[in-house]
Amino acid sequence: MSRYDCDRVASACPSLRFAVHPSRLRWQAAHTVLLALLAGSALAEHHHHQHGELDPLLLPPRVITSVQQDSPLTIITNPKDARQPIPASDGADYLKTIPGFSAVRGGGSNSDPVLRGMFGSRLKLLTNGGEMLGACPSRMDTPSSYIAPQNFDQLTVIKGPQTVAWGPGSSAGTVLFDRLPESFDEPGTRLDATV
């Protein structure tokens, strides 16, 4: 029945226009009870605050761990440092631990890093000075899916388009995964492993 039909029926019988249905009375009663309960608790809370009976609330200290920044636009960190989740499945998974980054899932285990709302070609990923390119259309295999962060010694994030030292087209920023040169001055052994 349309609204037009209801108006026509109500105008034919004036008693229907002002009739109160039992279901409407139940809803009105339920709303009245709900508002009375809310108003009562709000007034009790207000009375409690007015008379100074507020107990001090002690909160536990909150420890915030993050990468220490030398400048607001540049972050340099060691990708071998323990971060959550351990281990990072790809470069984007590790970059999510840096403030300003998030990720867009692209498959079962890879994701596309997002810096300040920009991703894709606006965020340049370089490994040892070379640009990392993804595969497949629609970014199914993102460039960060080929980066294992624990294999690199230094991660540098340069936010914004202020530098063009690593090429054009990085309006969001530039991410550098670098390996430091090895020093073989003394004989020894080394073992690196991940699970």
Image (cartoon, rainbow, N blue to C red):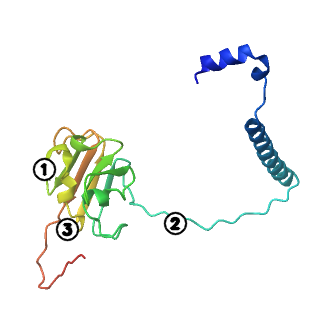
Looking at the picture, how far across and down is residue 194, in whole percent? 23, 75
Tag 3: residue type? Asn
Look at the picture and state if 11 lies above or below 81: above
Look at the picture and state if 121 lies above or below 89: above
**Disc 2: which residue:** 63
Tag 2: residue type? Val
Disc number for residue 151: 3
Tag 1: residue type? Ala
Label whose residue precedes the other's in the sequence (3 or 2)? 2
Q: Secondary structure at mark 2?
A: loop
Q: At 76% from the left edge and 44% from the top edge, which residue is drawn?
A: 30
**Disc 1: which residue:** 135
Label whose residue precedes the other's in the sequence (1 or 3)? 1
Look at the picture and state if 92 lies above or below 1: below
Give the distance between the C-alpha atoms of the residues marked 3 and 2, in whole angstroms: 28 Å
Q: Secondary structure at mark 1?
A: loop
* Front tag of 2 and 1: 1
